[in-house]
Image (tube, grey):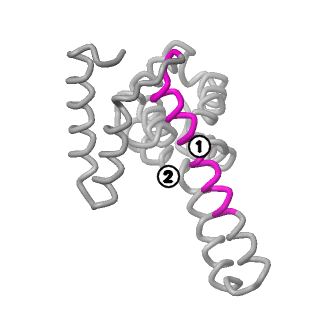
Amino acid sequence: MPTLLQVLLSFIKVGALSFGGAYASVPLVEREVVSCGWMSAAEFADLMAMDELTPGPILINSATFVGMRVAGVPGAIVATLGCILPACLASLALVLLYRRYADAPPVKGTLHALKCMACGLIASTLLAMATRTLVPDGRPALLLVPVVAGAYVALRRKASPLLVILACGAAGSVLAAFGAWV
């Protein structure tokens, strides 16, 4: 069994090298855990299934589960802290730099460009989802357009997202029950 220091260092490495989202970091976690002999590949696959069943970020859940599996509660705590420590330190450094240089034109220009990039990424995802949802199998699902529009209007008017989700699910069920689409 690994020492707590080994668990900490492994998950600091995972936390520092995890770019591209949670699923992009799964192979890194697997390599750390399986190559060290802490878990078999089959046990790691079971871990991933449990990660999908639990709320929260998959990387942090993975760290907590692995830490618990290999070193009990102290291992879970150490692995989780190791996983989040690099991101916390990087965020702290960026906040300190931002506070100092926020008014510098290059910083303002960079942040403006990053906001535009974020809008572009969100718009790209929105258009891809809208196309797949509203034009499934090449035929327009026109009866869903009012559902989408209603959800948009309700959310803009500060309706509870949970209520909007439930209402859209109910509307979709009614439309499907009457064979209106699908």
Residue 136 position, x and y percent, is 48, 20
The residue range painted magenta reads 114-137
**For residue 128, side relative to residue 156 (left or right):** right
**For residue 170, side relative to residue 150 (left or right):** left
Name the residue that disc number 1 marks: 11
Residue furthest toward the right?
A: 106
- Label 1 crowding class (10 Å Cα cut-off): few <14, some 14-19, many 20+? many
Query: Magenta stretch: residue 120 in it?
Result: yes
Q: For the point 59% across and 43% down, which residue is it? A: 11
**For residue 174, side relative to residue 87 (left or right):** left
| 118 versus 163 height, above or below | below
- Label 2 crowding class (10 Å Cα cut-off): few <14, some 14-19, many 20+? some
Residue 27 position, x and y percent, is 64, 28
How many angstroms separate mark 2 from mark 1 (CA)? 8 Å
Name the residue that disc number 2 marks: 81
Residue 82 position, x and y percent, is 55, 50
Query: Magenta stretch: residue 118 in it?
Result: yes
Examine the residues drawn in magenta and state their main secondary structure: helix
- Location of the C terminus by quadrant is top left
Between residue 75 and residue 147, name the one nearer to us: 147
Amino acid type at circle 1 is: Phe
